[in-house]
Image (cartoon, rainbow, N blue to C red):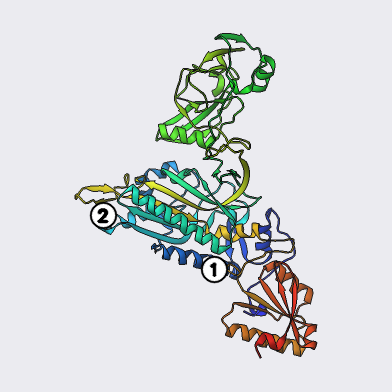
Amino acid sequence: MRMSKSFIYTTKETPKDAELKSHQYLLRGGYIQQVGSGIYNLLPLGDRVLENIKSVIQKHMNKSGAQELTLGFVTPASFWQKSGRYEKYGKELLRFKDRKDQDFVLGPTYEEGIVECIKGVVKSYKQLPINLYQIHLKFRDEVRPRFGLIRGREFVMKDAYSFHSSTQDLDREFDLMEQTYRAIFDELGIKYAVVEADSGAIGGSGSKEFMLLAECGEDTLITCPSCGYASNIEAARRHPRQTTPLSMQPQKIHTPNLKTINELSNHLNLPSEVILKCIIKGVKTLSGNKTALFFVLGDDELEETKALNALSKRDGEVLELFDLDMQSMQDFKLGFVGLGAEADFVIFDEAIEVGKTYLSGANEQDYHQICDFQGGDQDDLVLIREGDECPNCSAKMRYQKGIEVGHIFKLGTKYSDPMGATFLDQNGKAQPFIMGCYGIGVSRILSAFIEQNHDERGIIWNEVLAPFECMVIVSNIKNQAQREEGEKIYEHLIAQGKRVLFDERDERFGVKMSDFELLGIPQAILVGKELESGKIELIDRKTLSKQSLSFEAFLGE
């Protein structure tokens, strides 16, 4: 492609509200163009990179035996009503009516669409397993879109869905998809970690995330440097805690105005780990608002995704947690809520041991109580911290930041059951499909890769992702010899099947070099003053090192 004829427009100015380098460089380099909040045009350069990503994904997905299709971007709301997610998904689901007053949604994910696609078509266990995938637009009405393509409202995603007759076969496909994803990200040149994850709004029995490691990442990972255990903070586990026993007789203690764990610990000279902390939350459900009490050890913190998941396991109508206003909190004696308190849900963290003695609120203003924990509804509720012990090897764990670029799920019958999607098993009996789901954020990779590969000058693409493999730069287009030899090099590379960008613009040399550095093309071939000695220069974008080479040797003459 000739730069003078291309739709490539660069700028020196850093765009307003573009915090991350990837966002700044994609806008400045003319890869993307913002048209609305969280909505971007992919310009020719950006589209080339996207196609390169898609090509790698398609190669490995096809190799795995998956088949590509394309589902409708607009989905009838009736699909979502059948699965039960129309009410539960939240405001990120963009709902609208057509001219006939029928309800539709813009697909944020396609579990419902793919189930309707195969229902009644795949009828027998003999047609299973099957894995269908698409690389397609999605739309999620994010409350705060930011960071360019990393968290946009409209984006391109690869999503695959597998259908099985047994959980054992789902496990096999899940492992196959993990290996396929590793091969995809390895070829793309991404530094990533595979972590245990929360299934979120997709649901299912288990999931893993593929996290691109970057300091700007929105996701916090907990990792073990010893055995390699890694998890998203929302699903992280730790080795069971060994806490100091409290050797005091049951009693009520006057604690005027001592409402915080630190105040109690200092005043009573007790370690915070023997004090029970109660977190009060409102719970939005399909049938109305309720309240929940979550108890954790005093030096632990509540992880709200874990808390929400714990409630969802106990009540399928649970939608979300929220903070109660002061009027709603009047029934609770803040700072003094403890064992025996009543609410719609009362859940204790699994680290609280039955039969052990703790200091708890006495459910009476200005009083706490020493009492034994006699048991209750328990679950994993706590936020794992740096320094907590690894659940596998007990080594001290640490935090890392990451950007989610892939996620695989074991869905089971979460969607096939309510949507009536069944097949006939070996005994001729109707059974719901057992499903898996596998996603990759295709357009997100475009930005996320840059967060790992840039410098103060611009992007540093590798040859797999780069929109062009090399860039031919004519230093002075008015110099006839430079122009003619530049044309020869360009035509030579094109004949070899190379993807080449030819900068033959009538611009200053400094402008051309700045654009080369900003765009991040892996290599430049500079035709300049050295041509007088019969030489050209090869410039490596990553190191900016230069190598002189004979013009004839380069052309193989």
Q: Residue at the location (56% across, 41% down)?
A: 233
- Residue 497's spot in the image, x, y percent? 56, 81
Q: Is residue 556 above or below residue 162?
A: below
Residue 364 can be seen, yes or no:
no
Q: Residue furthest left?
A: 428
Q: In the drawing, does residue 195 fall left or right of residue 263? A: left
Crowd rating for badge 2 (residues with CA inside 10 Å; few <14, some 14–19, many 20+): many
Sequence order check, earlier mark of 1 and 2: 1
Q: Which residue is mark 1?
A: 52
Secondary structure under tag 1 reads helix
Q: Answer whether labels 1 and 2 touch (C-beta < 8 Å).
A: no
- Residue 365's spot in the image, x, y percent? 59, 12
- Can you tell which mark lies on residue 125? 2
Q: Residue at the location (61% across, 38% down)?
A: 396
Q: Residue at the location (66% across, 12% down)?
A: 256
- The three-letter code of the residue at mark 1 reads Asn
